Structure formats: C-alpha cells, structure tokens
Image (cartoon, grey):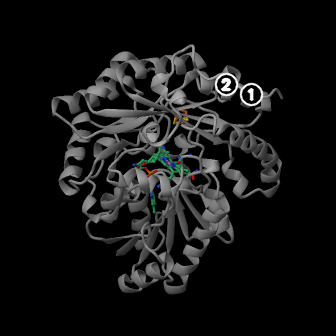
Amino acid sequence: MRIAFVSANREKLPDAVIPLGVLSVVASIPDHHETTLIDLCFERYPLPTLQEKLRAIDPAVIAVGMRNIQNAAYTGLDDQLNYYAELLASIREVCTVPIVLGGSGFSVMPRELMERLRPDYGISGEGEKAFPQLLAAIEAGGEGLDAVGNLHRVVNGEVLTNPAPAAFFDLHQMPKLDRTLLDSRYYERYRIESIQTKRGCPLRCEYCTYPIIEGRIGRTREPSAVVDEMFEAMEVHPEICHFFIVDSVFNLPRTHAKEVCKEMIARDWSVPWSCYTNPLGFDTEMAELASAAGCTGMEVGSDSGCDHVLKRLRKGFTTDHIRRLHDICESTGVKDCHTFILGTEGETTDDVERSVEFIVDLDPFAAIVMIWIDDYEALDPVLRKQRLKFREQIEARLYDLKDEFPYWIIPPLGVNFSKTLFRRVRRDGNHGPLWEHVRDLIPVPEALARSSRSDTDKRPLNLPSD
Ligand code: B12
Ligand code: SF4
C-alpha cells in the first residue's frame, strides 16, 4: 500500500522541531509498503499544498501526526483544534481513504479528539508497533483490528477504544531513522536536532500527560546506539549546531544518563546539547559528566516555589532540591532554566506570590514563567470560563513584574518570547534554546546585570500583599 504520512505541526516557537515521532513510525513500516512524508511545517499554504501532494501520491492510507494541541505559550487550543479540523476536511475533499491520527497531541485526549475530528482511526501512545498492525488489519479487510493496542475507531457513531498493548515498544528494536526525509529548512534555519535516549518517566506529577504517551517504566537505549545516531545525524546534516535530548527526564535513571555522557566523552563528542533534568537524583557527578560531554544547559520543571504546591502536584521534590540543583549547575558551569507554572489547580494568589519570591531569590540562569492552562479547557467552555479570571489576575501580576525582572521569559505575555527575538538570536549566530542566550540579549541596566549581583544586593522584593 502507499502510505502518506502528514506531519501537521507548524509551531516554530521556541524552535521548529523535526517530527521525530513520525520519523520513527515511518521507519517501522514493513518494506512492502511505500511511504511518503509530507511536512507542513514550512509550507506557506499548507492545506492546498497538502491536497496537491495527496492527489499526486494517491495513497491508500493517510497517517496524520498531531504533535501539539496547544501552542508554545500553552494557549491557542481552539486554533489548534480548528486547524486540525480544517486539515482533515481538506484531506476528505481529495481522498476517501482511511485517515489515521496519532502523535503526542492526539494521545493526551484521544477519545475527545476522535469525537471532535472524526478520523477513521486514531492510535494513542507509541506508533512503532500499533501502526504497522493497523496497516495489516486494513489490508486484511478489517480482520485483526481488535488486536491493535490503543486503537480508537468510530463504530456506529460510537468511539471504540482497544486496550493498551501488553508491553511497550522495546527500544533495543528502535528502527534506524532516515533523516534524509526531513525538510532541509529545519537545518538551514534552526540547526537544532532531536535525540532520544530513553522513554518513560517513573515519577507521578499530578498533571503530567507524558506517561500516557510513553509509560512510567524507563526503557533505555544502548548509550552506544544513541551516540551512533548522533554522529549519523551530523553526517546527514552537518549544519546541526545543537542537540536536544527529548527524554521526559534525562537524568533518571541516573546511571543510564551518566553512561550516555561517558559514551559521548569517550567518542570526543563536541556538539553542544541540552536536556530536561529533574532535581531528584541530580548530583555533582551528573552535572560534571554532562558538562564534559558538551551539555550547555538543563531545563528543569520546577513548577512552584511553594512546598505545599509541589506536594499537591506530586513532584516528589521540594524547594530545597531545586536550590541544590541550581547550586550544582552554577558551580559546574551548566546553565539552568527553570519553568514555573503559576495558578495550578488549588493555588491561591498568595501561593503565586510566594512562587514569585522564590524565583527572585533562586535567581536561576533563566526562568520561564507560565500560567497553568488545562488541555480540557479546549473542549469545556465552562471550565475555561472558571479558570479565565484567575489566569487574568496572574497575567496582570506578571505584567507588573516584567520590567523589574527583564531576564524572565514569560511566554503568555510574549516577554522574551517572540518570533522577532528568536530571529534576532539566530541571526546573531546563536543556536540552541533561546533561554541559553537570554542574559546576553536583554539590554538591562548594569545594576541589574547578574554578574554584578551578590547575595546581599539581590533586588528587594516589591510585592504587594494580597
Ligand atoms: C522534548 C519536547 C519538547 C522540546 C523539543 C525539542 C526538540 N528539538 O525536539 C521543546 C522544549 C522545544 C518542546 C516544545 C514544545 N512542546 Co514539547 N515535548 C517534548 C517531549 C518531552 C518529547 C517529544 C518527543 O520528541 N518525543 C519523542 C518522539 C519519538 O515521540 P512522539 O513524538 O510522541 O512520537 C511517538 C508517538 O506520539 C507516536 N506518534 C507520533 N506521530 C505519530 C503519527 C501517527 C500517525 C501515529 C499512528 C503515531 C504517531 O509514535 C511515536 C513513536 O512512538 C513531549 C512529552 C513527551 N514525553 O512526549 C512534549 C510535548 C510533545 N510538547 C508539548 C507542547 C505543548 C510543546 C509546545 C507547544 C509548548 C512548549 N513546551 O513550549 C512546544 C512546541 C514546539 C514545536 N515547535 O512544536 C506537548 C504536546 C501535547 C499538548 N498538550 O499540546 C507534550 C506532549 C508535552 C505535554 N505538555 O503534554 N517540546
Ligand atoms: S518528572 Fe516530568 S515527565 Fe516525569 S511525571 Fe513529572 S512532569 Fe511528567
């Protein structure tokens, strides 16, 4: 069969990211099928272009990768869902073959998206095993559909969902990805590459959707296989300037993360990289090995500056762990970027203020300050209305603070987070995550510059009481 894969993601903030997941599913398709990848990321007129390409390919199955349902500021849910609805309608105008949805965006709320978008099939979670199984079932006239793990389909107007597969995909069987299929503009314009060393996170943060996509049990890849893939990617796209390790948490399990770093060091890896890191299981040796292996920055989901909020979010760490991680990073020269999410379920305005105080006191290399938005707000206008008022209050508070703390990145307000700024960063020859450059970019008075700040001259907090 001819299978057309459509990578529908067009988000370019903070970077345009290669469709790593789609690429892995493409690589898992048995040889007797013919595959084509249509990437809409850089297309000026995505839907007409898609129609034109589909007419030319005349596929038997169309597989649509849905990476995000939110945008980079964690807003725009409606826009995203409307985009996908239009995309499916455009496909239906030119093709009558089965449409299959998959990807992380789909996986976070598969049943709701099946209801709303009405594709023929949807696969939540990993696609490497399930999608080839679905193709086999389609070829067999529908026989075997019940055995496809995590398959969703509409039968007599009802969404039917198959149970999850008995086991997750064995990462030692990971297919070789063909990066020659990728649009060269990812590399000409962004020069950032993605690599995965493991799947699964053992922690249980309250709001986290990652385990739905990749499970809780850490499945690791051979460090040598990871580094082989990194070298191969460099051969195909020598313009790559930075790697992002896409693991939910790179430093867990810690032994594996250290082994990956050691492998890079042993093979003289020299391209900078960054990753997500958790304050749990973080130690000086980890930071030193990472630094020696080329790690320039670590992103930390710190979330809150209040221990009781961290506890409610089931983060498993406290503000002391965050401080410790920051101190280790500072002493080993690895930049740390902490994301804080203000206004999570159950938070009060007082909690928000305490978190603000904590960020100021911690003074990490970079702080990304987000406002909590629930994925389900896209589907539930009542919930959205309830939450909107609190969000607006937090926005107003952050608006007041933005000039006082000019290094903070506040995506919902577009502060240090805009296409223009990102273009400037790249034009000046900087690569990797924007936050790694934020302190060099923002013209701030000398008095505020980080280098000139000591513990005693940290800016006084000027926070209003509630
Ligand atoms: C790493 C990461 C990032 C990095 C990416 C860096 C890079 N160079 O790639 C950064 C920090 C830049 C980032 C940014 C964003 N991210 Co992000 N990110 C992730 C993370 C942790 C891993 C993504 C990844 O590459 N996984 C590895 C690949 C192999 O897996 P995969 O894509 O899921 O693909 C598998 C399956 O989904 C499935 N599949 C994929 N496609 C298809 C297609 C078909 C047809 C089928 C059948 C199956 C299938 O099979 C694949 C292989 O098993 C995920 C969370 C997670 N653990 O999944 C969030 C995640 C994807 N991000 C998310 C979001 C929202 C964003 C942002 C919009 C917001 C933000 N955080 O700034 C931006 C958008 C960036 C962009 N340009 O699109 C959401 C998306 C869902 C949602 N709620 O909208 C996730 C799921 C996190 C979450 N909050 O739940 N992200
Ligand atoms: S550490 Fe990160 S990936 Fe793991 S459960 Fe918490 S938020 Fe999710």
Query: Would the CB of label 1 be found within 8 Å of ligand 1?
Result: no
Give the residue pinned by disc 1: 463
Give the residue pinned by disc 2: 357
Q: Secondary structure at mark 1?
A: loop
Report which quarter residue 113 is drawn in: bottom right
Badge 2 vs badge 1, beta-carbon distance below 8 Å: yes
Q: Residue at x 67, y 72 (%)?
A: 156
Q: Nearer the viewer, mark 2 or mark 1?
A: 1
Name above or below for residue 181 compared with residue 274.
below
Left or right: 416 in relation to 330:
right
Front residue of 366/187: it is 366
Count of number-bearing discs: 2
Q: Residue at x 45, y 24 (%)?
A: 451
Distance in Å between CA atoms under marks 2 and 1:
8 Å
**Please, which residue is most extreme toward the front here?**
446
Amino acid type of disc 1?
Answer: Leu
Left or right: 234 in relation to 25:
left
Whichever of callouts 2 and 1 sits on the residue coming sooner in the sequence is 2
